[in-house]
């Protein structure tokens, strides 16, 4: 059940029309890293989380709903940036409101030209209102959404999504001089950081959460770092010393071609790992049973009901 309040979460304001920036801002309305993509990603992820992780379901639905509110803020800002332009252009250009920020016929023609050249579809097809397209006029696409059904994978996708969105807002602020618009963008950017930390905390609360999914990594192929670019090679924490959180040492292989031939295509090393392979099989069975039980225990017997309505007022 959604309840809409006509007051924005953040009081978006604009000091003057800027159709060119309004077009750029479409990236956060109908673009790949925009607010609609984030809202739909967290909204769809929530369904798989409902039974095994009801607490994460609550978080995902809350953040998804906030992202919808951010979409409204972006849309409202775009509409205000097109003030005086987003109706019939001649009448709008002659209105006293736009003439307060423009100076004569030349300025009037400049702003109309900016509206048209930024993205002709914007004022012509969409009538000057925000459409679910990016700044190049490419329609929003469901392929932007990452929802894999495993919550640890989804949360890692969300960390990346929030990181990308934060950078988009950071870049957007370089293309406007409007202090009110910058204030709005700063708010939206900061909420991306807040959501990042929420997802980070949620991921940390699921243990174990590595490797993603149920099946464990094959110990025969976990530790090798293959030096496929031998010239000016670099040895660093990602290929020497202890592997992060694995209690194992990296195995640096300076000559992958020779190593692969000597090990018969990485198959002539099984005896060394027999004990670890047996342990891997045990953990696979334990994890499979545990994940299965998480869902089964949360599923009600008899008629399935998504909601448990509390009649107390």
Image: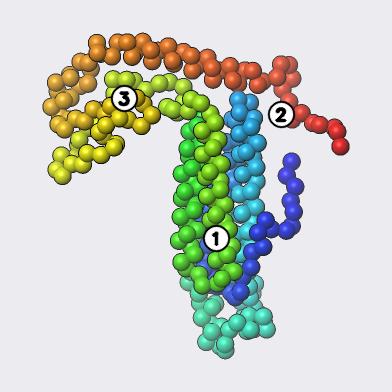
Q: CA distance from mark 1 to mark 2?
A: 37 Å
Q: Position of residue 288 (x, y in %)?
A: 50, 17
Q: Position of residue 301 (x, y in %)?
A: 71, 16
Q: Is residue 164 visible?
A: yes
Mark 1 sits on what residue? Answer: 186
Task: Give the SS element for disc 2.
Answer: loop
Of 95 and 50, the residue lying toward us? 50
Left or right position of 67 against 270? right
Q: Which residue is found at the position 33% from the left and 14% from the top?
A: 276
Nearer-N-terminus badge (3/1): 1
Give the mark toward the camera: 3 or 1: 3
Q: How many marks?
A: 3
Q: Which residue is found at the position 18% from the left and 41% from the top?
A: 233
Of 284 and 137, the residue lying toward us? 284
Q: Residues within 10 Å of mark 2 (few under 14, many from 20)?
A: few
Q: Residues within 10 Å of mark 3 (few under 14, many from 20)?
A: few
Mark 3 sits on what residue? Answer: 248
Mark 2 sits on what residue? Answer: 306
Left or right position of 296 against 220? right
Above/below status of 54 relative to 80: above
Nearer-N-terminus badge (2/3): 3
Q: Position of residue 258 (x, y in %)?
A: 13, 27
Above/below status of 212 relative to 30: above
- The reply to whether discs 2 and 3 touch (Cβ–Cβ < 8 Å) is no
Q: In the rendered view of the protein, which quadrant contains the C terminus?
A: top right
Q: Is residue 47 visible?
A: no
Above/below status of 310 relative to 219: below
Q: Position of residue 161 (x, y in %)?
A: 49, 46
């Amino acid at each position: 059940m959604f309840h809409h309040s006509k007051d924005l979460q953040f009081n978006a304001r604009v000091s003057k029309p800027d159709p060119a920036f309004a077009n750029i801002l479409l990236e956060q309305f109908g673009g790949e890293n925009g607010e609609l993509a984030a809202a739909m990603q967290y909204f769809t992820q929530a369904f798989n989380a409902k039974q095994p992780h009801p607490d994460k379901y609550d978080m995902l639905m809350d953040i998804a709903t906030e992202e919808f509110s951010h979409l409204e803020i972006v849309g409202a800002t775009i509409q205000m940036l097109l003030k005086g332009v987003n109706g019939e252009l001649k009448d709008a250009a002659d209105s006293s409101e736009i003439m307060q920020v423009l100076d004569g016929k030349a300025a009037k023609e400049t702003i109309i030209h900016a509206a048209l050249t930024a993205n002709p579809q914007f004022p012509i097809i969409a009538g000057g209102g925000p459409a679910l397209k990016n700044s190049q006029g490419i329609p929003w696409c469901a392929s932007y959404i990452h929802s894999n059904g495993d919550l640890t994978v989804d949360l890692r996708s969300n960390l990346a999504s929030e990181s990308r969105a934060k950078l988009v807002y950071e870049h957007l602020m370089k293309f406007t001089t409007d202090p009110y618009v910058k204030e709005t963008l700063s708010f939206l950017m900061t909420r991306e950081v807040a959501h990042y930390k929420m997802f980070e905390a949620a991921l940390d609360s699921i243990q174990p959460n590595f490797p993603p999914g149920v099946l464990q990594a094959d110990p025969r192929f976990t530790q090798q770092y293959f030096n496929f670019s031998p010239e000016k090679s670099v040895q660093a924490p990602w290929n020497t010393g202890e592997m992060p959180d694995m209690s194992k040492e990296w195995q640096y292989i300076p000559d992958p071609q020779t190593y692969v031939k000597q090990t018969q295509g990485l198959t002539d090393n099984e005896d060394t790992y027999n004990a670890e392979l047996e342990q891997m099989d045990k953990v696979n069975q334990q994890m499979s049973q545990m994940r299965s039980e998480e869902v089964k225990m949360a599923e009600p017997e008899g008629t399935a009901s998504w909601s448990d309505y509390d009649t107390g007022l």
